[in-house]
Image: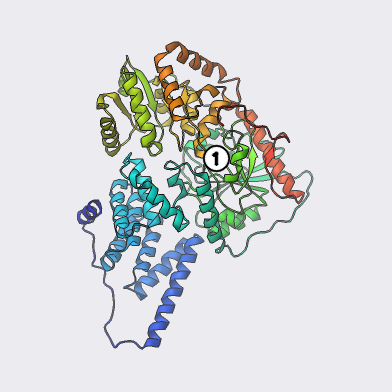
Amino acid sequence: MGGSQGFLRHKGASTSLRSGKKRGKKPLVGQAAIGELDSHLLYKEILLAQVNNELNQVGLLAQKGVEKYPTQTRFYTLLASFFLKTGNHLEALKYLTHALSLEPKSSEILVSIGNTLESWGKPHDAKGFFQAALTVEPSNVPAISNLLNLSMAESDWSFFPKLPDMLKVLDKRKTLGNPFNLLSVVDDPMLHKSHLVGRDRLLQKNVLKNHKFKPRVTPGDKIRIGYFSADFYDHATMFLLGKFFENHDRDRFEVFLYDLQKFEDTALGRQIRSAAESYVSLVGLTDKEAAERACADGLDIAVDMKGFTKGCRPLIFAHRAAPVQVSYLGYPGTSGMAAMDYFLGDPVTVPASNRQFFSEKIMYMPHCYQANDNLRAHPEAITAKAELGLPEDKFIFCSLNNPFKVTPVEYDIWMRLLHAVPDSVLWLLAPNEHLKKNLTDEAAARGIGPERLVFAGRVRIEAHLARLPQADLFLDTFNCCAHTTASETLWSGVPLITKPGDQFASRVAASLLTAIGCEDLITQSAEDYFDLALKLAQDPEALGQIKQRLKDNLWNTPLYDSEAYLRDFQDLMEKAVLRQRAGQAPTHLFLNEEDIQPKTKAS
C-alpha cells in the first residue's frame, strides 16, 4: 500500500474530526433497533437521491447522517462523494481519511480515496489506493475496473498475468464497473452486453415512471431532434462534427441541444449553440427532471452522444426523453438499455453477425457511421521533424493513439518491426514521465533501446494536424482501435494499418479505411498486420502508391463527404420517427430495404 500510505503521510491526513458521540447509559434493545432502522432508511434515501442525480439532496442528507451517526463510515463516504462532484477534492479527502481512521481495512473507502485522487488529476497516487483495496478485498469490482484503467493509461502492464482472474471476478459479480475501462483490455462484446443489460435492470428499479408515447400522425410537422452531450465545446467529437448541427435541413428538422455540463465559453461552443433552435443546460436538474424537460419540448427523437463516457447521464434515457432514442458516436458499444431503441452503426462496424452484441436495433449508415468535417483546414505548414524530435533519415512508425489503448500484444509486434527495420523509430503519444519510463522499460525487455522511441506530448488540434504528416505509417491498436485519431491520420495523408476484432470499438478504423477506398490496409491476423507493416516499411514505391491513393480519394469517396453523410443521417432519423408515429416497433433500419453486407476485408 506504499503509494497510498505515502500520499496520506504527505497530505497529513487529519483524523481530528470529532465524533460528537456522547457517553451515557446503554440504550435499550428496542431503541437500538429503531436507530439502526432509521440509519438504514436514511442511507437508502441518499442512495436513491444519488441515482437520480439529486446532488444537493445527497449533500444535505449525507451531512445529516454524519452528524447523527458519527461512527458510521458510509455517511462520510457519501458526503465525500457530494464534495467530489462539486469539485471540492480537499473536503472530500478530509471526510474520507476520517472514515479510513474508523475502518482502516475498508476497501470501499480506499476505492473512494482513489476515485477522488484520480478526479483531482493525481492518477498515479490513485493507483496505490486501488491496489490497497484489492489487497483487502481481491473481488472489489470498482477497484479492479479503475486499476485496469489507470494502469493502461500509464502503460503499466504488470496486471496482465492476473487479468484472467480479474475477468472471472467481474463475470461472477455480474458487473464490469465502468464499462469503458474494459474496452481496451478485452475484446468480448457479449460480456459487455450481458453485464450492461443486467446493469440496466438494476437501474430500472429507480425509474418510477417511464414516459409512454402514443403514436401520432401530424403531417407537415418538423421532426424535433434533441442531442444530449457534455462536449459542446472544443472537444474531439465536435471537431468531427464540424457544421453538422448548423447544416440540418430546417424544412424537416428542428435542432435542440441539451448540455450535460456547465457551458464552456469557447468560440466553437458559441458557434454550436447558435446552430440550434434551442440550447438547454441540464445542469442542476435531476435525471427525471431532465427527461421531463425534453418531453415538454416535444422531442420526437433523443440522441445520446455520451453513452458511458465522461459526463454521461444514462438515466435520463431510462426515464424516456423522447418516443425514439438513439445512441450515437460517443460510446463505441451497446448501452444495454431497454429504453435505448437504436444504435447508429454501419455494415463494417456492425455486420449482421454482430447485431447479437447489441440490445438496440441498428441504424445502418450506408458507408461509415462516423461524421467527418470536410471543412477542416489542412495545416499551412508542416512542423519540422527536428522540432518534433524525429530523425530526418529514418522510417517513422507511429501510433499516436491514446496510451490506454496499447497492450503488450501490439507492443510485441511493434518491437519486432523495429528489429526487422533497423533504420526506423517508433513515435508514441506519452504525455507524462510514468508513461515514458514504462514504455522504455517494456522496449528494453524486448531488446530495443531508448533511442528507437520518440515520445510526443498532447497538443491542440491544429498542432496535431501539423505534425501528423511527418509519420510514414500509423500502426493501430487492436481491442480499441483509432477512432477520431484514425480520421485525423487519414486526413493528413498517412496510411494506417488496422486489425479489426469482434467488438465495435475494434472495428472503427476498418470502417474508415473502407469508406476511403483503402481496404487493403485492413488485416485479419497479427501476422498479417506485421507482414503488411514490414512490406510497406521496406517498399517505398508501394507506400508511395497508397499515400497517393489517400490523397486522390480524399474528395471522391464517402468518408469526408459531410453533406452526403448528413443527408443519410437525417433520412435514417426520419425513418425511425415515421415508424414510431405509425405505431411500429423499432427494427434494423437501412436506407435501402435490402441488407447489403460490406465488400471489405473487415470480416
Quarter-of-image position of residue 343: top right
The amino acid sitting under disc 1 is: Leu
Is any part of residue 169 visible from this angle? yes
Residue 358 pos. (x, y %)? 58, 46
Residue 294 pos. (x, y %)? 62, 53
Give the quarter of the figure containing the C terminus: top right
| Residue under numbered circle 1 | 329
Q: Is residue 160 left or right of residue 483?
A: left
Total of numbered circles in the picture?
1
Q: Choose between 61 and 529: the one closer to the eye.
A: 529
Neighbours of disc 1 within 10 Å: few (<14), some (14-19), many (20+): many
Q: Is residue 537 left or right of residue 359?
A: left
Residue 331 pos. (x, y %)? 51, 43
- Which residue corresponds to the image point at 52% horizontal and 17% vertical from the top-left? 551
Image height check: is 102 above or below 198? below
Q: Choose between 120 and 43: the one closer to the eye.
A: 43
The local secondary structure at tag 1 comes to: loop
